[in-house]
Amino acid sequence: MRKHLQGIDHVVIAVSDIAQSAASYRRFGFTLTPHGRHTTGSENHCIMFERDYFELLSAPVAHPVTRYYREFLGQGEGLAALALATDDARGFHDELAADGIAVDPPVDFSRPVKLENGTFNAAFRITQLAPEATPAGKVFACQHFTRDLVWRPEYLKHANQALGLAGVAAVVDAAQLESVARRYAAVFATAPQPGHLGGAPHFDIATGNTPIRFTTAAGLAQLLPGVPATARPQPCFAALFFRTASVAATREVLRANGVPCIAVPQGLAVAPEQGHGVALVFGE
């Protein structure tokens, strides 16, 4: 594992309409942070857990930093990016560059956070890998300068009892599966671990906290039987897994809010057409 890398900080679900997606995720039982606007023109809501989070993000304004998301949304909504936790975005940049991995210079940005005692700026520094380095979805490192403005206790409890990120699954054509997995493993300076599920191959990558599984469409069908495939073209991130304190509580929230769910070996799943392009899987 790299010196300036501490696992996955958060993941980004790119959405066309921030208000519509926020309403969906509230129906799933998540508590959302207030609507935010970045200095780069993007808009978001975050769903916070004790150690990590995920983000709903739209990019209505053209900006070099958000160009990837605008192009991504041209092929539909979905899980667009992995944000890696780093203590030093510049140091992470230098680590990757030294290994010949295409990476952009660090960029600083912020977004206002309204609290009872005033409005403050949550500040970040990110180092983005070139899109061709990670073809299933963008990877960037995120250094937080104002964690106290992001991890607020009032946002950490969720009606669906979700506790944090548990994993990510990506779908890749069989001919490219190993090579794509190796590209992502290189980001973490580790090696992909091969395996099979029901005869379908997969490669698992340890990230320091939230593992990533690369598999084929047949492999994802074995992993999540009965869950429709995402409509996005391969390779892509297809499923997001959550740890929950109670699958029964999650099921009850989804039922009460009229959200269809599918029983899977891990617990419960919400189909990609409901989850704005990504399957959501809840397990204890």
Image (cartoon, rainbow, N blue to C red):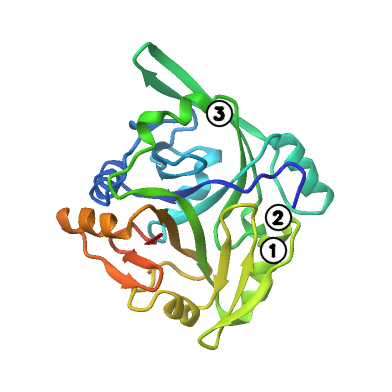
Residue under pointer 1: 183
Of 72 and 147, the residue lying toward us:
147
Q: Quadrant of residue 37?
A: top left
Residue 79 vertical position relative to residue 124 in the rendered view, above or below: below
Task: Compare marks 2 and 3 and give the one earlier in the sequence.
Answer: 3
Residue 87 left/right relative to 156: right
Depth check, mark 2 against mark 3: the one in front is: 2
Q: Amino acid at mark 2?
A: Val
Residue under pointer 3: 109
* Residue at 69 percent of width and 62 percent of height: 185
Q: Amino acid at mark 3?
A: Phe
User: Can you name the residue that lies furthest to the bottom here?
Assistant: 199
- Element on which disc 2 rests: helix
* Label 1 crowd bin: few (<14), some (14–19), many (20+), radius 10 Å: some
- Element on which disc 1 rests: helix
Of 230 and 40, the residue lying toward us:
230
Q: Are marks 2 and 1 in contact (CB under 8 Å)?
A: yes
- Element on which disc 3 rests: strand
In the rendering, which numbered label is found on residue 187? 2
Q: Position of residue 227 (x, y in %)?
A: 34, 73
User: Can you name the residue that lies furthest to the top here?
Assistant: 117
Residue 105 left/right relative to 48: right
Q: CA distance from mark 3 to mark 1?
A: 27 Å
Of 75 and 209, the residue lying toward us:
209
Q: Amino acid at mark 1?
A: Arg
Residue 247 vertical position relative to residue 88 in the rendered view, above or below: below
